[in-house]
Image (cartoon, grey):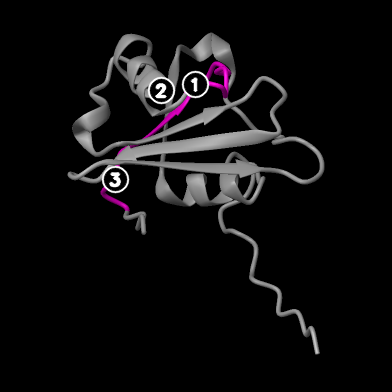
Amino acid sequence: MIQLTPQMRILLAVKAVDFRTGIDGLARICRQVLNTDPFSGSVFIFRNRARTAIRVLTYDGQGFWLCYKRLSKGTFHWWPDESNGHVSVLAVHELQLLLWNGDPGTVRVGPTWKKINIF
């Protein structure tokens, strides 16, 4: 399990990546494009070209975690502009909003959980 804490460094790759790329390819992007050591414990966020999916890569001291989220409908609305460089630094609450497909620039809290009765 990955626990997000306020002390974590969260780096978002601004440019889209090829999602056929695995852990080693994403670690190479961390080194060569983002100029950051993938073994640093930072959390790295990547998106696909269609903006329908994101990948989260982090190293926990023993191995890499690679998490994947694909939207069932629509696209991720918010993503930093490529004119600001290759990487954007996020706070934990901004990552939480991004995972819920919110805009960290306009909203400060994530959506509340909805209770669904299935019986």
Check the image and report above or below for 112 versus 7: below
Give the mark nearest the N terminus, 2 or 1.
1
User: Residue 111's spot in the image, x, y percent?
Assistant: 65, 62
Residue at horizontal 72 percent and vertical 35 percent from the top: 77
* x and y percentages locating residue 96 in the rendered image: 52, 51
Q: Which residue is mark 1?
A: 21
Tag 2 near tag 1, CB within 8 Å: yes
Instruction: Identify the main secondary structure in magenta.
Output: loop
* Relative image position of residue 73 (x, y in whole percent): 81, 44
Q: What is the number of the mark on residue 26? A: 2
Closer mark to the observer between disc 2 and disc 1: 1
Q: Which residues are magenta?
A: 6-21
Percent position of residue 59, x then y: 27, 39
The N terminus: image quadrant: bottom left
Q: Secondary structure at mark 3?
A: loop
Q: Quadrant of the C terminus?
A: bottom right
Residue at screen point 21% across, 31% down:
39
Crowding near the residue tagged with mark 3, few <14, some 14–19, many ≥20 C-alpha atoms within 10 Å: some
Q: CA distance from mark 2 to mark 1?
A: 6 Å
Q: Which residue is denoted by mark 3 in the rendering?
A: 8
Q: Earlier in the sequence, mark 2 or mark 3?
A: 3
Q: Tell me: residue 67, above or below residue 53.
A: below
* Amino acid marked by disc 1: Thr
The secondary structure type at the circle numbered 2 is helix
Q: Nearer the viewer, residue 86 or 74?
A: 74
